[in-house]
Amino acid sequence: MSAHADSRKPHPPGTVAWALADPLRAVLAAIAIITVITGVVEVPFGGPLLQVLGADSTPETRQLFGTVGMFMVVVGGLLLHTLLNPVPSPEVVLWSGVQKAGAFGAVGIGVLNGVFAPIALVVAFFDLATAVLLFIHWRRLGARPAVGLSR
């Protein structure tokens, strides 16, 4: 080994080491990235996506779909940000899970009411699975109920 190699600082763990250290956290980070990308795509391409989901593409539905996409970017970005921190915020993980569970319910209700075609259930069940994983991760973070909120 050369003197040059011995004088180097240890290299921080890379992405693979980080992912192997906590696979659930890595999967959730990947889902957060997918959420951001999907939200970004929904804003300008809401019309074609609504058609794929079997919904009407009107100015109103495209506007609403774009607004939902914007919130997906924000929630997905916030989740990714906290997952990349040395200690993720349990509150962000919890509320991201609530958002995903709510998305499952909203899309499911949309299918039941004929707003979306049954193909949209693929999206709904992906959101449900993500919510379950987020709640598992939240529990692993040692989350405790908030104190001082009762009167």
Image: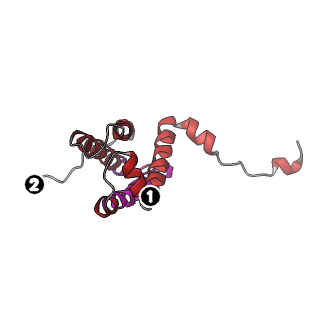
Asked whether 13 falls inside the magenta stretch, the response is: no
Relative height, residue 79 to residue 114 (above, below) = below
Residue at image mark 1: 45
Q: Reply yes or no: does residue 75 show up in magenta.
A: yes
Instruction: Using residue 92 as the reference point, say whether residue 11 is left or right of it.
Output: right
Which amino acid type corresponds to the residue marked 1 in the rendered image?
Phe
The residue under the point 26% across, 41% down is 111
Between marks 1 and 2, how big is the CA–CA gap? 47 Å
Give the position of the N terminus as an image quadrant: top right
Query: What residue appears at the point 39 percent right and 55 percent down from the top-left corner?
Result: 72
Residue 37's place in the image compared with 16, above or below, is: below
- The foreground one among 104 and 16 is 104
Q: Is residue 70 above or below residue 2?
A: below
**Where residue 96 appears, x then y in whole percent?**
35, 48
Question: Mark 1 or mark 2: which comes first in sequence?
Answer: 1
Magenta range is 64-93
The reply to whether residue 78 is in sight is no
- Image location (x, y in percent) of residue 149: 17, 54
Looking at the image, residue 117 sits to the left or right of residue 2; the answer is: left
Q: Nearer the viewer, mark 1 or mark 2?
A: 1
Quarter location, residue 105: top left
Residue under label 2, please give it.
151
Q: Main secondary structure of the magenta part?
A: helix
In the rendering, at what x and y percent does residue 12 appear?
Answer: 65, 48
Number of marks: 2
